[in-house]
Amino acid sequence: MGCDGGTIPKRHELVKGPKKVEKVDKNAELAAKWKYCALSQEKLRRPIVACELGKLYNKDAVIEYLLDKSAERPNIEVAAHIRGIKDVKELNLTENPAWEGERRNTKGDCYEDMHCAMFICPVVGLEMNGKHKFCFLHTCGCVFSDRALREVKTEICHKCGDPFQEDDIVVLNGTKEEQEKLQKTMEERRAKAKTGKSTYIYSRFYWIFIVSSDSKSAPVNGESSGSSNIPGPSGSSKTVKPIAAAGSKRSIQQMDEKSEAYKSLFTSHSSAKRTKDQLSNWVTHTPYHF
């Protein structure tokens, strides 16, 4: 059964040790995050968008996913939080002048730098290849390195000049802790947008704008929150007229701000009233024939 003819078995051939953990190539992992779409696994190409969790997508792939969510996709759970096109932001990226594209090494006879990226930071010049931390602004979509935002502290975008706050900074392809923080921020932003929606109530004569927030409600339908006399800057009081109720009717002839020529256009005007002899009967052709 073997071991004859002078063969000497080694220890690893007889004793089975623990299985070695397969290590993932770091360069391949970084290239998968920063050079390929997280949804379609295709190479990133403009227009490139990012979600509120900092993942990169091709805009075409996101639109196809939103149009047909029933299709079987390999990474459909990655985009489960994307409800519509408004949940992603198109990125304003800066081209890398050193990037020559894939046509440079078509023959495979020259060195290819795996860390050379398509885009760079417009302030510091760092390449967006995963070696450095990058962020984008949720307000305008401009992309910068974290080093640029830390060294040049400002509340105005370095590229387009739009104002932003610290909550508008989203980390691209962050760690698990950073993604959990972005998840909480996303949920808070969506809850705030849901409670802060405005509703319009239509009435016959005017629109009433009501904001569903914690602010003080304005008086509606003639109800006053306090005194009806509002003191002016000179100390005099100004009487505020109550708003007419939505169901009440007001004759045009009673409106003092309307001119007499405008009032004469309506049948309620005195010139439109007829005498008893001018009223229609069963013989007349129309009620206005006299």
Image: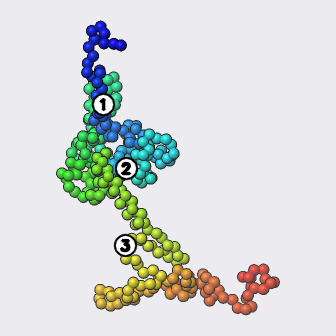
- Residue drawn at 20 percent across, 52 percent down: 150
- Residue 245 left/right relative to 38: right
Mark 3 lies on a secondary structure that is loop
The image's mark for residue 51 is 2
- N-terminal of the pair, mark 3 or mark 2, is 2
Which residue lies most toward the top here? 5
Q: Mark 1 points at which residue?
A: 19
Q: In which quarter of the image is the N terminus?
A: top left
User: Do residues under tags 1 and 3 come within 8 Å of each other at their CB atoms?
Assistant: no
- N-terminal of the pair, mark 1 or mark 3, is 1
Counting from the top left corner in percent of width and height, residue 172 is at 30, 47
- Residue drawn at 56 percent across, 84 percent down: 249
Q: Name the residue under label 3.
A: 214
Query: Is 146 drawn above or below residue 277 in the view shown?
Result: above
- Residue drawn at 34 percent across, 50 percent down: 53
Query: Is 173 drawn above or below residue 221 in the view shown?
Result: above
Front-most of residues 128 and 31: 31
Mark 2 lies on a secondary structure that is strand
